[in-house]
Amino acid sequence: MNPFSHIPTKRELAAEACGSNDHFSRRTLLQGIGLAGLSWLTPLSRQLTLAAETTGKRPKSVIVLWMRGGASQLETFDPHPGSPIGYDSTAIATATKGIQFGKGLEQTAELTNDFSIIRSVTSKEGDHERATYNVKTGYRPFPGLVHPSIGSVLCHELPAPLIDGSTIEIPTHISIMAGRDSARGGYLGAQYDAFQIGDPKSPIPDVRSRVDETRTAKRMDSLNILENSFSAGRLASLEKERTLHQSSIERARHMMSSDQLSAFEIADLPKAEREAYGDTPFGRGCLAAVRLVEAGVRCVEVTLGGWDTHANNLEGVLKQNAILDPALASLIKGLKARDLYDETIIVVGTEFGRTPKQNVTEGRDHWPHGFSILMGGGGLKNGQVIGETDPTGEKEEPAGKVRVEDIHATVLEKFGVDYEYELTTPIGRPLAISDGIPIRALL
Amino acid sequence: MSSSFSRILIGLATLAALMVAAVVGLSFYLKEPRLEELPPSNLGATEIQQLETVNQIFADHWKSENLSPTPEADTLTLVRRLSLALTGAAPSLEEIRRLKSLTEDADPIQSWLTHLFSDQRYSNYIAERLARTYVGVEQGPFLVYRRRRMVNWLAEELVRNRPYDELVRDMVAAEGIWTSNPEANFITVSVIQNGENKGPDEVKLAARTSRAFLGVSLDCMQCHDDKFGDHWKQQDFHQLAAFFAQSDMAVSGVIENRKKVYQTRYNGETEESKVPALVPYSPELLPESGNYRQRLAQWITHRENRAFSRAMVNRTWALITGRPLSSPVDDIPLEGPFPVGMEEFVDAFIESDFDLQSLIRIMAASEPFRRSSSTGDPEAPVTLEQEEAWAAFPITPLRPEQVAGSVIQAGTLTALDGNTHIFQKIRRFGETRDFVKRYGDPGENEFIEDAGTIPQRLLLMNGKLVDERTEPNPLMNSSTRLAHHSPSDEAAVDVAFLATLTRHPNEEESRHFVSLIDGTKSKHREKMMEDVYWALINSTEFSWNR
C-alpha cells in the first residue's frame, strides 16, 4: 500500500472548498487524521522518529524566521540534484544520512538532529500578500476579518511572562525588520500587534524621551489635568474598557525606564559571538532574537527578504543561503548555549515555495503546492523529514501533504493552547484559534 | 555650471521670500485676522423635512427607552468631528476663525460643510476611504491595476458630487483600459494573472459587490449555505458571481466576453454545474436588456433595492461618526430589524437621487450627531446604553492618518488645504506615511474600535513627527510662533488649545498652562510652549473622536 495514499475526510473536503471549516465537529474527526498523520512520514524519517528526543515540558517562546518573497525549497531544504527539476543546483550532505540540503547551508546541515524539515507544506495562496497572511495566521484572508498571527495568539492565550517574579516590562511580541508584513493582532486587538524594530544595529525607535526629567514631570502634570477634564461626564469605563490610553502611557514609560531594554542591544556581546551570525541585518536580528527570548519575550519574528527569485534563481538563492546559514545555525547554537533551545520553538517559514520548472530567465515562480518549513526546539521531536515532493515535478500534490494551518496547530498544541477553542470575532462568527491538525510526528 | 548656480540662487531667493512671507503672514494673522468668509449656507426645505422625520424617530426611541440625551455639543466640537471625518485632520486655526465671520441667519454647521465640500481635502480623503471599500488596500495585480488612478477618479466624482448610483454603475459595468477608464480598476483588482482561471475573478467580485454595494456579506456562502440563521444559499452567491463571469481581459482592457460560461462545484456535489446569472432577491428589479454586468449594475442601484442605499447610509454614518448604525458596517440584515434612523436616512438618500453631500448634511444636522459625548455632569456620566442609542455621541478611536493629519495641522496655523505649497504637501505626505506605518493601520477594516497601544503612545510621546512639528522653530511651527507673537499668555494657551483640541481651555486648564509660560522668555519660552503642545497632543482627547 502506498503510505501516502489518503482518503480525504469531510472536514478536509470542507477546508479544500472554503478555507474555513469551523462548522464540523473537530474532536471526532481529529483522531482519524491524527493517526493518518503518521503515515506522512517517509520511511527514513520514521526511523529517525524513534531516535528523536521527547520532553514533557512546555515551550516558553517561539522564534519565527521569515523568508520573505517565497524561498525556493529546491535550493534550500528540499533539493533534487540531478533530477529534471534540479537544473544546475547542487546539494550537500547533512548530519542525517540520506538527507541533503541545498549548497550554502553547510552549517545548518550539521544540525539536522536539532530540527525537522517539513517538505510537503501546501496552501492555496500564490500571491505574496495573501500567502504571507495565510502562513502567518494559519487562515486565508477573509473579508471583514483580520486573523491574528501565531505570536499574537500565544501572547493572548498565555499569561504575560514573569521576570524575577514581576511582569515583563518590554513588549512580548517583537518583529524585527518585517516592514508592512509585521505580525498583527487582528481581531484580538491592536495591542497584540508585534512591536516593530529595524536592524538591531540602530537603537530602537521612540523609547527615549526627548526632554529631561524635569520637563517630563511637568508634561505629565499637564497631561493629568487634561485627562481629568476630559473624563468629566464621559463614559465611566472609558479608560479601562475602551481607550487604555493612560495605562498605555504608563506602560510605555515603564518600558522607557526599564533595564530590560538592554535585551534589544547586542553590541555588548562578545565579538566572536556576534561575528558567528554573520555581519548582516538578518544575522543581527537572529542574535537579538536569542537575547530577547532570554529576557522572556514570547514571540520574535525576524525577516530576511530577497527570496522572490523570478530570475536567476540559483544565483539568488545562493546569496540568500549565505546570509541564512550562519544566522540560523548560530541561533540554534546560541539558544542551546543558554539552555533555551528546549523551551523555544523555532520555525523557518516562507509564504510559498517555487516552481519545479524554471522559467525562461532561469528563475522559479510562485509554488504553494509543496514547499519546505523548518521546525525545531521547544521539545518538538527533532531530526525528521516529513513529506516528499515529486522529483520529476509532474505531480502537483506532495506526498504526506501538510497544510499551513497544521503548522499552527502543532505549535499551539506544544504550547498547551487549546487551539480548537472558538473565539468570538468582531463579525459575530465564532472561530477556532486554529483550524489545523497537529502534526503528530513532531509531538 | 553657471546654469546650476543660477538655479541654486533662484531656489534660495524663493526660499527666502517664502520665509519672509510666512513670518509676515503669521504676525499679521495673529494680530488682525482678515479672513475669507465662510460661505453662509442652510439646509433646503426638503432636507429640513427629512431631518425632522429622522429627529422624531430618535426622540421617540430615546423616550421609549427612557434615555435622556446628552446636551448638544458646541459648534467647535461639531466642526472638529466633521473636519476629522471629511478631511482626515482637525480644523486649522485659520478655519476656526472663519466661523466668526458668519451672520446669525446662517447655519454654522451647514456653512462649514459647504466650505469642506469645496475643498480638495474632502474629495481626496473620502475617495481614499471609499476606495478601501471598493478595491481594498492590497497592491493588487501587476500592471493591470492602478489603485492611484481609481482613487483620483473617485475624488473627481466626489468634487462633482455625482449621484452615487451613477458612480457605482460605472464601476460594476466598467469596460476598457484601467488607466483611461479608471473605474475599470474595480474589475482589474480581482484579476488572476496565472493558471487556468486567468482573468477577472468572479468570486472575489461577487463578494466585494455584495459587501460594498449591498451591505451584505455573502463570502461564507461561496462554500456552503448560511449557517447563521439567514436564508442565504450557496447558490445565491454563485448566481451573483455569474454576472461577473463574462468579464475578460483583452488588448482593449476589460471586456464582456459572451462566450464565457460560469461553472462551479456545489458543496456535496461531485461534478461542476453551469451556473445561471440570477440575483439573490427581487428579480423583478433586474432589467432584461444589456450585458450581464450592465444589468446587475441597474439592479444593484435600483431605487427599490433598499439594501443599496442602506449600505451607503451605514457607511456614511460610520465615516462621519466613527461607528456604523449597524455593525459590522458591511453586514446589515437584508430584511431587518434595522437600527433606529436607518430607514429614515435611506428614504432621504433615495429621495435626493443618491446625493451624498445632501445625506451628509442631513446626518450632520441630526439630533444624534449633535449630541455631546459628555453629560457635563461628573456625578452622572454617559452610560453605554446612551451611547448605543445615540443619545450620547460615542467616543471612537481616530484612524492613524487622522492622528497624523491633526498633528501636522496643529503644528501650523493656516489650513493645509489645496492652496498649500507643494513643498509642504510633499513633506506632509512623507510624514503621514511614516507615522501610519509605525502607528498601525487597520487597513480595510475601517471601523474596528481597538484600544490604544504602547507603540502608539511611544510614537506620540517620543516620535519624530510630534517633535519636529512642535519643537522650537520660528519659521515652521505654531508653538514657537505663539510663544513670541501672542498678545498675552492666556491668548497663547487659548490658541494652542484651539489648534490641537479645537476647543478653549477651561479655567483650571488655562490657569495651569498659563503658569507654565508665565514670565518665560526667548528660548525657554519656546520650550515651554513645546511642552504645552506635547501635553495637548498626548491627551486621550487628541487621539479619540469625541
Image (cartoon, helix red, strand yellow):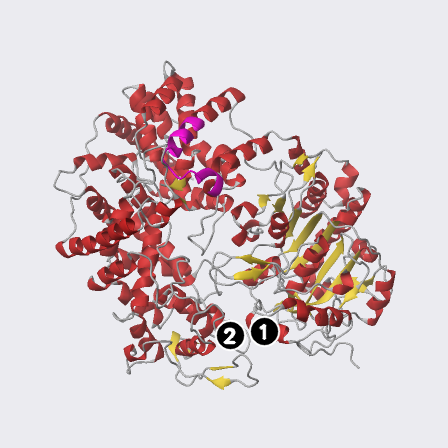
Q: Distance between the residues labelled 2 and 1?
A: 9 Å
Residues at circles 2 and 1 in contact by the CB criterion of under 8 Å: yes
In the rendering, at what x and y percent does residue B524 appear? Answer: 42, 18
* Residue B119 visible, this orientation: no
Residue A361: assigned label: none
Between B25 and A7, the one lying in front of the other is: A7
Tell me the amino acid under the disc marked 1.
Answer: Ala
Please tell me in which quadrant of the rendered image residue B83 appears: top left
Q: Mark 1 points at which residue?
A: A14
- Residue at 19%, 34% (x, y): give it: B100
Between B298 and B28, the one lying in front of the other is: B298
Q: Main secondary structure of the magenta part?
A: helix
Whether labels 2 and 1 belong to a single chain: the reply is no
Q: How many labels does the image show?
A: 2
In the rendering, at what x and y percent does residue B271 appear? Answer: 55, 86
- Please indicate whether residue B13 sits to the left or right of residue A118 in the image: left
- Residue at 34%, 29% (x, y): give it: B496
* Residue B10 visible, this orientation: yes
Name the quarter where the C terminus of chain A is drawn. bottom right
Q: Give the range drawn in magenta.
A: A223-241
Q: Is residue B471 above or below residue B269?
A: above
The chain that hosts pointer 1 is A
Between B376 and A205, the one lying in front of the other is: B376
What SS does tag 1 mark?
A: helix
What SS does tag 2 mark?
A: loop
In the rendering, at what x and y percent does residue A62 appear? Answer: 69, 50
Q: Name the residue under label 2.
A: B224
- Please indicate whether residue B531 sits to the left or right of residue B55 in the image: right
Q: Is residue A115 above or below residue B392?
A: below
Q: Is residue B176 above or below residue B399?
A: below
